[in-house]
Amino acid sequence: MTDTAAAPATRPHRLAGMLLADRHSLPLSIALHLVPGILIVVAYLLIAEPFVTAIGYPIFLAWAIALVVVLLPLLGGLLWLGRERNGRPSLRGVVGYLGRPIPRGRIIAAVAGLIVWMTVVSLALTPLDDAVFDALFTWIPFEGAGGSATTYLDGYEHSLLVTTMLIGLPLTGFSLPLIEELYFRGFLLPRIAHLGWRAPLLNTVLFSVYHFWAPWTVVSKVIFMFPAVWLVWRKHDIRLSIGMHVGTTLLMAGIGTVALALNLV
């Protein structure tokens, strides 16, 4: 009776202790990298796709909704861990690499270079994504699946496309990539740093695989994400990957939204 009553009070603390440990075991780290991606696909199939299909909006909006459904609670989980550690919701002691060891001028220059790298390389590798999709993933049942990201927007009225892009801009362009960086690079990467150079490689590969809704992009994601992940691990400064990831997605989403609004595409 006593043990049963005490269990609910101690279980969360054990879980927090395991997650907040300085090191994660390899199986735990793999699970923590990949489970959010599985949940995003489930949220898409059960919640987002039926809703967006019912209102007749581009399927791109469904993926944005599915990401919100999973990543916002994920951020809440990080804040809960902060409360367990600090007595209040906080990222201190939960998210690593926040010390800002790189001077401001150098971080701005590095982030600018990384944004150029990610933008140019991701666009240059689109034919590779197309080829991998055609060779291996034509069976994927998701609407709009294909090597190009624009396939999620094809075939809809112009007004719906513009509205979808405006809704998605602050989400897929800014807040969702930011949460991904806090979780994958700030929370998970430091806890496998003991693996040495294999840590940023493993983190990059697992982050790329986490995108279960677009498995044909895994190779290209590894190529254009790895330099920033390696630098974060090497320099202990998460601003590098945040700047690259958020900066690039915001830039591309912003250009795409403006181009659609002006009927340029």
Image (tube, grey):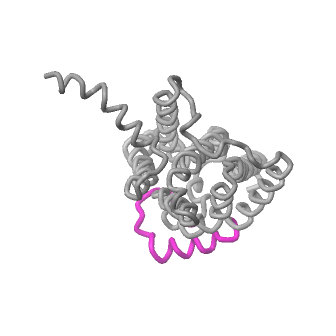
Farthest residue to the left: give it. Answer: 1
Give residue 152's position: percent from left, percent from top.
Answer: 56, 55
Give residue 23's position: percent from left, percent from top.
Answer: 46, 50
Q: Which of 62 and 162 is in front in this view?
A: 62
Give residue 156's position: percent from left, percent from top.
Answer: 58, 50
Q: Which residue is drawn at 68% across and 59% down?
A: 231
Give residue 6's position: percent from left, percent from top.
Answer: 24, 24
- Report the quarter where the N terminus lies: top left
- Report the quarter where the C terminus lies: bottom right
Q: Which of 17 and 209 is in front in this view?
A: 17
Q: Residue at x 79, y 59 (%)?
A: 113
Q: Which residue is drawn at 66% across and 58% down?
A: 234
| Residue 246 showing in the rendered view | no
Q: How many labels does the image show?
A: 0
Q: Which of 144 and 160 is in front in this view?
A: 144
Residue 81 among magenta residues: no
Q: Which residue is drawn at 73% across and 44% down?
A: 100
| Residue 231 showing in the rendered view | yes
* Magenta region: 123-147
In which quadrant of the rendered view does residue 173 lie? top right
On screen, residue 195 versus residue 47, left or right, reads: right
Residue 140 among magenta residues: yes
